[in-house]
Image: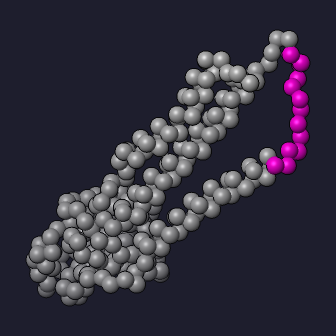
């Protein structure tokens, strides 16, 4: 079968699309997620990029399968009224059952693998911070500075969570009343705060700076004001901050 120049060009274009997509993805940043901010980002950004590449490949193949018959198998003027009708093509049906299953299984595998790393709190950690969510603000406790080292925010004055750079911190997350969620977009991290259940997570912050945090589960009238700041500081600044909290509850 010989292809006309137009057909050859079209074939080249269709084949080039996935290649172009793959090469551009490797250069694209975190596709909306920040990179390198914490040890969580190191897990979630590659997962996010991989999911987009997988989605792109599936999308391009699907587009080819739609365009191919539309371009090359159009109704012909002098052709039959209907093309040959085929039913129950077993290999095709097996393929379109097995392929999506494989796609889901691969995405599931990588998601569980990354999630296990993020929620693994059995490793060594240097600091501990307790986070308490309540209607409608946050309370941060620094047990290493004593029982009085507690910072409580209000809707009008969101509290600041101070975190040392390069140090592994284990966080304990609780809720006083209803379900809330601890969400820091820059850290690509969110975890639910549940009343009566203690959740744990652990990560290392790797970039100095101030980040915004939110409760991102609707928790009542003033949910939208349930914000906080995260400040990543040097270890010396962190220790100095703990000193200011000792014996003077804020
Ligand atoms: Cu909330």
Based on the picture, tell me whether residue 81 belongs to the magenta stretch: yes
Which residue is farthest top?
77
Q: Which residues are magenta?
A: 79-91
Residue 158 placement, left or right of 244: right
At x 11%, y 72%, the residue is 237
Front position in the image: 78 or 146: 78
Which quarter of the rendered picture does the C terminus lie within?
bottom left
Instruction: Give the prevailing secondary structure in the magenta stretch.
Output: loop
Residue 103 placement, left or right of 42: right
Measured from the top left, where is residue 149 in percent x and y?
20, 82
| Image quadrant assignment for residue 189 | bottom left
Instruction: Examine the rendered structure and indicate whether residue 170 appears above or below residue 19.
Output: below
Which residue is farthest front?
2
Measured from the top left, where is residue 242 in percent x and y?
15, 79
Measured from the top left, where is residue 140 in percent x and y?
27, 75
Measured from the top left, where is residue 44 in percent x and y?
42, 61
Front position in the image: 233 or 29: 29
| Image quadrant assignment for residue 240 | bottom left
Which residue is farthest bottom?
146
Work out whether residue 60 can be spotted.
yes
Query: Across the whole image, how many numbered discs are drawn on residues?
Result: 0
Which quarter of the rendered picture does the N terminus lie within?
top right
Work out whether residue 177 can be spotted.
no
Instruction: Examine the rendered structure and indicate whether residue 111 appears above or below residue 127.
Output: above
Based on the picture, tell me whether residue 227 belongs to the magenta stretch: no
Instruction: Examine the rendered structure and indicate whether residue 130 appears above or below residue 106.
Output: below
Front position in the image: 106 or 140: 106
At x 43%, y 42%, the residue is 23
Instruction: Examine the rendered structure and indicate whether residue 223 appears above or below residue 88.
Output: below
Residue 226 placement, left or right of 63: left
At x 79%, y 52%, the residue is 94
At x 35%, y 57%, the residue is 185
């Amino acid at each position: 079968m010989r292809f006309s120049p137009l057909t050859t060009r079209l074939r080249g274009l269709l084949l080039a699309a996935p290649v172009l997509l793959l090469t551009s993805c490797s250069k694209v940043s975190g596709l909306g997620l920040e990179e390198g901010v914490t040890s969580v980002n190191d897990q979630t950004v590659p997962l996010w990029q991989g999911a987009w590449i997988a989605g792109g490949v599936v999308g391009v193949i699907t587009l080819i399968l739609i365009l191919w018959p539309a371009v090359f198998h159009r109704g012909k003027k002098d052709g039959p009224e209907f093309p040959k009708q085929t039913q129950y093509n077993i290999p095709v049906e097996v393929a379109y059952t097995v392929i999506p299953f494989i796609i889901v299984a691969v995405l599931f595998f990588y998601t569980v693998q990354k999630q296990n790393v993020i929620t693994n709190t059995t490793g060594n950690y240097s600091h501990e911070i307790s986070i308490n969510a309540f209607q409608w603000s946050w309370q941060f406790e620094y047990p290493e500075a004593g029982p009085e080292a507690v910072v409580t925010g209000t809707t009008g004055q969101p509290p600041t969570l101070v975190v040392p750079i390069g140090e592994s911190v284990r966080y304990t997350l609780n809720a006083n009343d209803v379900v809330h969620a601890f969400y820091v977009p820059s850290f690509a991290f969110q975890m639910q705060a549940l009343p009566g259940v203690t959740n744990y997570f652990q990560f290392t912050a790797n970039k100095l700076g101030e980040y915004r945090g939110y409760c991102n589960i609707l928790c009542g009238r003033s949910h939208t004001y349930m914000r906080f700041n995260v400040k990543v500081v040097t270890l010396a600044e962190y220790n100095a901050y703990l000193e200011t909290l000792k014996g003077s509850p804020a």
